Amino acid sequence: MAEQLRLMAVHAHPDDESSKGAAATAKYAADGVDVLVVTCTGGERGSVLNPKLDRPEVWENIATIRRAEMDRAREILGVRQDWLGFVDSGYPEGDPLPPLPEGCFGLMDPDEAAAPLVRLIRSFKPHVITTYDEEGGYPHPDHVMTHKISMVAFDAAGDASRYPEAGEPWQPQKLYYNMGWSRKRMMALHEAMLEATGESPYTEWIKEWDDRRDVTDRVTTRVPCGEFFEIRDDALRAHATQVDPDGFWFAVPLPIQQKVWPTEDYELVKSLVETRQPEDDLFTGVR
Ligand SMILES: [Zn+2]
C-alpha cells in the first residue's frame, strides 16, 4: 500500500488559503492526500471588504464571523484546518507608517512564534510544506512573519535538540513558496481578456508594474488544477466579509483562466529528495 501523503499549507489569515494555492490543495485533497491548512492568525484586524456586509454588527463580531467563514471554506476545499492562535497585526497604512499593535503576530520573535508550528509539523508529519516568500508575497507584516516561522519550523522540526517540548522530531521533505502572481501569468490573463472582451481588470496593475518584483523566473513547479478553480472561487466567496463577490478576484471568467493558465505555481526552495525541474507535482521525488 502506498504511504499516505500529507501536505501542509501555512497561511497568515483566514481567506489566504482560498486565494493562494487553493485549487492545488483542493486537487490534492480530492486525490487522497491529507491536506492541513494552518492559519497563523484569527484575522481579527481584517477589514470588511464586501460592501454588502459593511455593517456595524459585522464589524463588532468580525473574529467570530471569520471563524465561521473559515469553517465553510475548509469544507468546500475538502481540507483540514488548524489555527496557531496569533493575533492579526492589521495592515499598516499611512506616511509615516503607524507602529504595529502590541502583542500582534508581526511583532513576535520568529523563534518563539515557530513553536506551535513545530508542534503541528511533528504531529501532522507533512511531507511537503507550502508558505510565502521572504517578502510575504505581499508586504503584510503577518505574511512576512508567516514566512519567517515556516523557515524556522521546517529546519527545526526534524531536530530533536530544538523545541524538545514540541513532540517527536519529523523532517518534512520539501518546502515551497506560493508564486501566484508572476508577470508572465498576469500578462497572459490580461491579453486573453483584451482579446475576448476588449478590457482587462489588470490594466492599472500592469501600468504600475515594478519589474524588480517579478517572480516569473522563480517558478519551478506548476501544478495543473484548472478543474478546481471553481472550488477555489467558491471557497474564497465563503470568506464573505473579505471579498466582494462582484470584485477583482472574480473578474476573469473561469474558461479563460482554465485555457490560458490552468496551473497554480510554486517555487521549490528546500528539498531533501531528488527532483528534476520543472516539476508539475509538489510530491515529485516523494511519491
Ligand atoms: Zn492575509
Image (cartoon, helix red, strand yellow):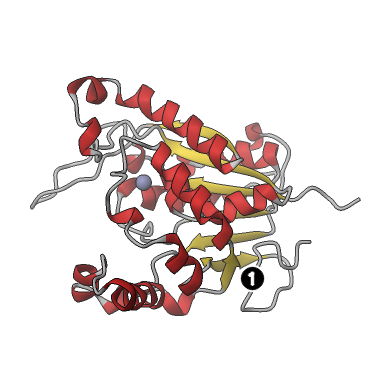
Left or right of 152 on screen, residue 271: right
Which residue is rendered at x = 38% and y = 56% of the image?
A: 136
Q: State the count of labels.
A: 1
The quadrant holding residue 139 is: bottom left
Which residue is rendered at x = 71% and y = 49% of the image?
A: 33
Left or right of 138 on screen, residue 283: right
Q: Residue furthest left?
A: 95
Q: Secondary structure at mark 1?
A: loop
Left or right of 222 on screen, residue 245: left
- Identify residue for label 1: 280
203 shown above or below 7: below
| Residue 13 spot, x, y in % from top left | 40, 41
**Given the image, on which type of amino acid does mark 1 rest?**
Asp
| Residue 18 spot, x, y in % from top left | 46, 47
Q: Residue furthest right?
A: 1
Does residue 158 appear anywhere in the picture? Answer: no
8 shown above or below 63: below
The quadrant holding residue 61 is: top left
**In the image, is the residue at mark 1 within 8 Å of ligand 1 by its beta carbon?**
no
Does residue 91 appear anywhere in the picture? Answer: yes
| Residue 38 spot, x, y in % from top left | 53, 40
125 shown above or below 102: below
Where is the C terminus found, in terms of image quarters? bottom right
